[in-house]
Image (cartoon, rainbow, N blue to C red):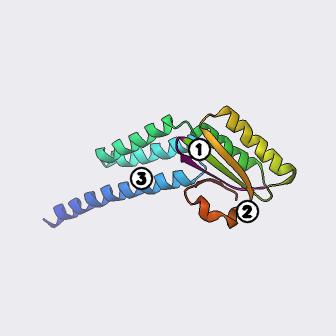
Amino acid sequence: MKTQEKISNFETFTKVFAKVSFEDAENRVSEADCSTREIKGLTSDIMGFVSEDSNVELMNRIAAKVESWSRDKTLLWRNSLVEYGRTNDDIVAIYCKRKEGASEIIVVADQSGGEAGLRHNDFCFELFDKYRDIGDFMVLDRGEFDGMKSYYKEFVKIYQRG
């Protein structure tokens, strides 16, 4: 009886662990600046772990999440923004949010004025012209952003320097 009970407890543990692993990975992907390939690799790894456990409910949740990523129209310009942040050393962070069907972007740089500020604004205007779901954007310096941080609580960080 003890052996059967241990097996049952272990099966319950692995199902809970798989669910927690998926939820943790989902949160980390939301906060990280992963490429599409990295996201697919992470999803594949999680699916492999979950399928070994035969957790059909969790596999369906993962499949639904991956499907939602493939329908996400913001993924292209988000990837462009993340890549832009990676290639510009003066960008501290990039945030975005959806509001009433349109996306808003905040680029936080070491300085928002001068030539660098103009370059960042030009890049954002290019994205704004190319992708219709971008409704607004701002380029702020670190001090401006820190001073108004309470207004941006709904924004999600998609890029962080360092």
> Would residue 82 appear left or right of 15 to someone viewing this image?
right
> Would residue 94 appear left or right of 61 to someone viewing this image?
right
Q: Secondary structure at mark 1?
A: strand
* Residue found at x 58% / y 55%: 155
* Residue found at x 52% / y 55%: 28
* Residue found at x 43% / y 48%: 46
Disc 1 versus disc 2: distance between alpha carbons?
21 Å
For the question of whether residue 33 can be seen, the reply is yes
Q: Amino acid at mark 2?
A: Glu
Look at mark 2 in the image and give the residue it sits on.
Answer: 144
- Label 3: how many residues lie within 10 Å, few (<14), some (14-19) or many (20+)? many
Per the rendering, the mark at residue 161 is none
Residue 131 spot, x, y in % from top left: 64, 34
Residue 96 is one of the magenta-drawn residues? yes
Q: Secondary structure at mark 2?
A: helix
Disc 3 versus disc 2: distance between alpha carbons?
36 Å
Q: Which residue range is magenta in the image?
A: 90-101
Look at mark 3 in the image and give the residue it sits on.
Answer: 22
> Would residue 118 appear left or right of 155 to someone viewing this image?
right
In front here: 44 or 121?
121
Look at mark 1 in the image and give the residue it sits on.
Answer: 103
Q: Amino acid at mark 1?
A: Ser
Magenta span: predominant SS is strand
1 or 3: tag closer to the N-terminus: 3
Contact? badges 1 and 2 (CB < 8 Å): no
Residue 18 spot, x, y in % from top left: 36, 54
Up/down of 50 relative to 131, above or below: below
